[in-house]
Image (cartoon, rainbow, N blue to C red):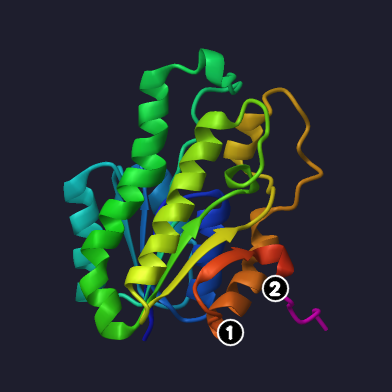
Amino acid sequence: MSVAIITGASRGLGLALATGLADAGWELVMDARGAADLAAATSQLRGGHVVGLPGDVTDAAHRRALVEAAARLGGLDLLVNNAGILGPSPQPPLADYPLDALRDVYEVNVVAPLGLIQLALPQLRSRRGAVVSVTSDAAVEAYPGWGGYGSAKAAIEQVSRVLAAEEPDLRVWWVDPGDLRTRMHQEAFPGEDISDRPLPDTVVPAFHRLLAGAPPSGRIRLADLPVEAAR
């Protein structure tokens, strides 16, 4: 049985990916900061065994608990670093970006994922597993107002590149899911109508294609992965 950790899994993309993996029979360790939301999310999943551990990925003890839970399920095959924060909303230009907020953005979006990777590596190495870090086009494009979040995503992409070079037996993917109709995306555009963005579950087939095809480590845009049309 395959085992995955998915962070930030109580809603949005994290919950969509968890649902897709659970439906495929994976055993899951899911985390989110809100205990009630996480319990509601895990209760709706069917398939493999699901463990929900509420907590903050910036907490080292919580990260250890996630990895230990995966070990109890038999060992980790896939780590999905999905948890993240946008930062101030509306997003300020770099000239006015509050540095304390920037530190928080980097702590959640860069430092915490690396901390979880470090703890997970022994299990991932033994099972020749995979690491997915969710990124954004803001990591590679210069959008005004996106300097904090975008630079943090650029940092986790570089962490992923170096990890891929250092761990050639693993698959390391930094995955851009595209613009989705999520709470975080709404926070980025306060007061605007984002109903034209696709829902998170629309990218799940492409995520399955990624896992099944297991391409070499690298940057992946889910929109570029071919999926079979529904019959």
The residue that appears at 64% across and 48% down in the rendered structure is 137
Under circle 2, the secondary element is: loop
Q: Are marks 1 and 2 in contact (CB under 8 Å)?
A: yes
Label 1 is placed on what type of residue?
A: Gly
Residue 147 is covered by the magenta coloring: no
Rounded to the nearest whole Å, what is the CA distance between mark 1 and mark 2?
A: 10 Å
Under circle 1, the secondary element is: helix
Task: Give the magenta part as a residue range.
Answer: 226-231
Could you tell me if residue 95 is visible in this image? Answer: yes
Image spot of residue 71 (x, y percent): 21, 73
Quadrant where the N terminus lies? Answer: bottom left
Residue placed furthest toward the top: 96
Image spot of residue 108 (x, y percent): 37, 40
Q: Quadrant of residue 161?
A: bottom left
Residue 230 is covered by the magenta coloring: yes
28 is higher (above) or lower (below) than 127: above
Image spot of residue 103 (x, y percent): 36, 29
The residue pinned by badge 1 equals 213
The residue pinned by badge 2 equals 225
Image spot of residue 41 (x, y percent): 46, 55
